[in-house]
Amino acid sequence: MVMNIISHFLLIKLELFPLLINFMGLNHKKGKDMSLEALDQLQEKVQKMLEANALLQMEIEEFKEKNIVLEEKINAISAQQKDLVDQNNELKQEKTVWQNRLNSLLGKMDDI
């Protein structure tokens, strides 16, 4: 949708240049009627550009809101990951302690 709006905006912008030249009187072939027609066309194109700009601004705001939500999710997941890494390290240490105790007990049983 953004690409459609941007391409529409660029097309309108490209269409405005000849209309503006026509309105400024550089094309004198058809006189005042042509200038009024060009002015009407120019006004219509400007209105379309303003509407496209408003749509883009609304879409930017939507993306900003979505970005905030995603950043919050990323922060929550990062915190969960850190907690899980810490828990995993603690479990590894406990496993090592239990392995050492078991090896010690097995060594005592071999002595008996």
Image (cartoon, helix red, strand yellow):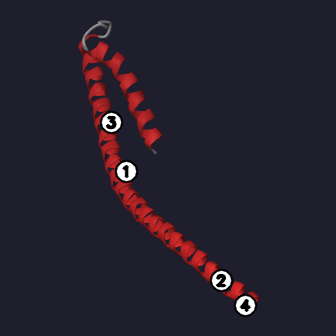
In whole angstroms, how far apart are the C-alphas of marks 4 and 2?
9 Å
Q: Which residue is mark 1?
A: 63
* Residue under the image location 38 percent in, 57 percent down: 71
Comparing 36 with 74, the one in front is: 74
Are the residues tagged 1 and 3 within 8 Å (C-beta)? no
Mark 3 or mark 2, which is nearer to you?
A: 2
* Residue under the image location 32 percent in, 7 percent down: 29
In whole angstroms, how far apart are the C-alphas of marks 2 and 1?
61 Å
Mark sitting earlier along the chain (3/2): 3
Q: Which quarter of the figure is the C terminus placed in?
A: bottom right
In whole angstroms, how far apart are the C-alphas of marks 1 and 3?
22 Å
Find numbered disc 3 in the image and state the secondary structure of the residue it sits on.
Answer: helix
Find numbered disc 1 in the image and state the secondary structure of the residue it sits on.
Answer: helix
Q: Position of residue 6 (x, y in %)?
A: 42, 35
In whole angstroms, how far apart are the C-alphas of marks 4 and 3?
89 Å
Q: Position of residue 39 (x, y in %)?
A: 25, 23
Comparing 56 with 73, the one in front is: 73
Mark 4 or mark 3, which is nearer to you?
A: 4
Q: Residues within 10 Å of mark 2 (few under 14, many from 20)?
A: few
Q: Is residue 104 left or right of 55 when viewed as pictured?
A: right
Are the residues tagged 3 and 2 within 8 Å (C-beta)? no
What's under tag 3, amino acid-wise? Answer: Lys
Q: For residue 104, which numbered disc appears in the image?
A: 2
In whole angstroms, how far apart are the C-alphas of marks 3 and 2?
82 Å
Q: Which residue is mark 4?
A: 109
Q: Which residue is mark 3?
A: 48
Find numbered disc 2 in the image and state the secondary structure of the residue it sits on.
Answer: helix
